[in-house]
């Protein structure tokens, strides 16, 4: 199964993609996570994208497309994958269609998590991730059951993203409305876009997605 999840920063893409991947036994491919891994490793690519990501702008399509083309060709993607944070521009969406067509694949579901912009800064500024397993938490909205201990793996080290501050969030939202909104139109015109109420609770959203994906 191949799933695309669209939505603004803070709309819950990462949380839901992680759950869908686990349930469907498929791979979650987050271009943001892939880029952050490069930055953390200090690779050439990481050095190139660090400043751009910190400013909240989009990384160039070339970089993203090379990364995705390489990744979806790997063995662990044979069962399918969930794209989280990609495609984010119309050229990326078109290139994805081309890449999939070459492999005889098509997208099964395109979801848009629909949210109001005014709640996003709050959602984003409180969030953090388990350093060991990547589980996502929020200080107020979704804290671990035991303070500072990961529910999923027991880890006690957490990361906060460098770009999760109010100023960068506004730039990321702007980039979304300018560059990613056309991607919504692209899938809508194909009759493929399915809107999901992203303002609902985390478990309710998961329930909706599970129902549709079967
Ligand atoms: P969010 O959706 O919360 O903004 P992501 O983790 O998806 O976070 O992305 C973080 C940053 O990584 C983006 O602001 C952008 O700079 C870069 N990025 C991630 N995916 C893409 C993409 N598909 N195209 C261009 N830039 C991307
Ligand atoms: Zn963990």
Image: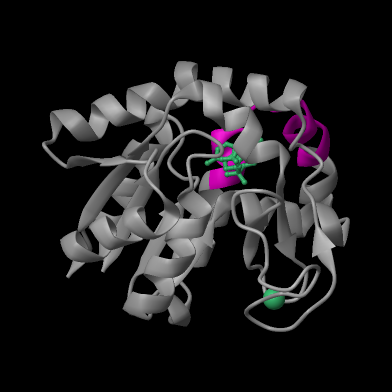
Quick check: is 140 in the magenta stretch? no
In the image, residue 197 above or below residue 142: above
Q: In which quarter of the image is residue 142?
A: bottom right
User: Relative to the observer, which residue lies in front, 21 or 211?
Assistant: 211
Q: Quadrant of residue 149?
A: bottom right
Q: In which quarter of the image is residue 145?
A: bottom right
- What residue is shown at x 84% (from left), y 58% (from top)? 40
Question: How far across and down, in percent of the image, does residue 130 sit?
Answer: 73, 68
Quarter of the picture holding the C terminus:
bottom left
Question: How far across and down, in percent of the image, does residue 13 sit?
Answer: 47, 49
Instruction: Report the side of 169 relative to 95 (left or right).
Output: right
Q: Can residue 138 be seen in this view?
A: yes
User: Relative to the observer, which residue lies in front, 32 or 114?
Assistant: 114
Question: How far across and down, in percent of the image, does residue 28 sit?
Answer: 48, 66
Question: How far across and down, in percent of the image, does residue 164 sit?
Answer: 74, 37
Query: Which region shows up in magenta?
Result: 49-64
Q: Is residue 58 visible?
A: no
Per the picture, the main secondary structure of the magenta-coloured stretch is: helix
**Residue located farthest toward the left when viewing the structure as drawn:** 191
In the image, residue 87 above or below residue 27: above
Quarter of the picture holding the N terminus:
bottom left
User: Relative to the observer, which residue lies in front, 143 or 3?
Assistant: 143
Quick check: is 57 in the magenta stretch? yes
Instruction: Report the side of 165 relative to 1 (left or right).
Output: right
Instruction: Report the side of 125 relative to 17 (left or right).
Output: right
For ligand 2, the image quadrant comes to: bottom right
């Amino acid at each position: 199964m191949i799933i695309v999840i669209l939505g603004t920063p803070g709309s819950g893409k990462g949380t839901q993609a992680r759950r869908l991947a686990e349930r469907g036994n498929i791979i979650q491919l987050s271009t943001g996570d892939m880029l952050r891994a490069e930055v953390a490793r200090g690779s050439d690519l990481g050095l190139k994208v660090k400043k751009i990501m910190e400013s909240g702008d989009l990384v160039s399509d070339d970089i993203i497309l090379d990364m995705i083309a390489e990744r979806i060709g790997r063995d662990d993607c044979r069962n399918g994958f969930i794209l989280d944070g990609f495609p984010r521009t119309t050229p990326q969406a078109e290139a994805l269609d081309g890449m999939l067509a070459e492999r005889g694949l098509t997208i099964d579901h395109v979801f848009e998590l629909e949210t109001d912009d005014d709640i996003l800064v709050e959602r984003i500024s409180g969030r953090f991730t388990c350093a060991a397993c990547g589980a996502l938490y929020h200080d107020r909205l979704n804290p671990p059951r035991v303070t500072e201990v990961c529910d999923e793996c027991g880890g006690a080290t957490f990361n906060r993203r460098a770009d999760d501050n109010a100023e960068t969030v506004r730039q990321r939202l702007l980039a979304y409305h300018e560059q990613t909104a056309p991607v919504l139109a692209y899938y809508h015109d194909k009759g493929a876009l399915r809107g999901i109420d992203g303002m609902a609770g985390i478990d309710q959203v998961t329930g909706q997605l599970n129902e549709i994906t079967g």
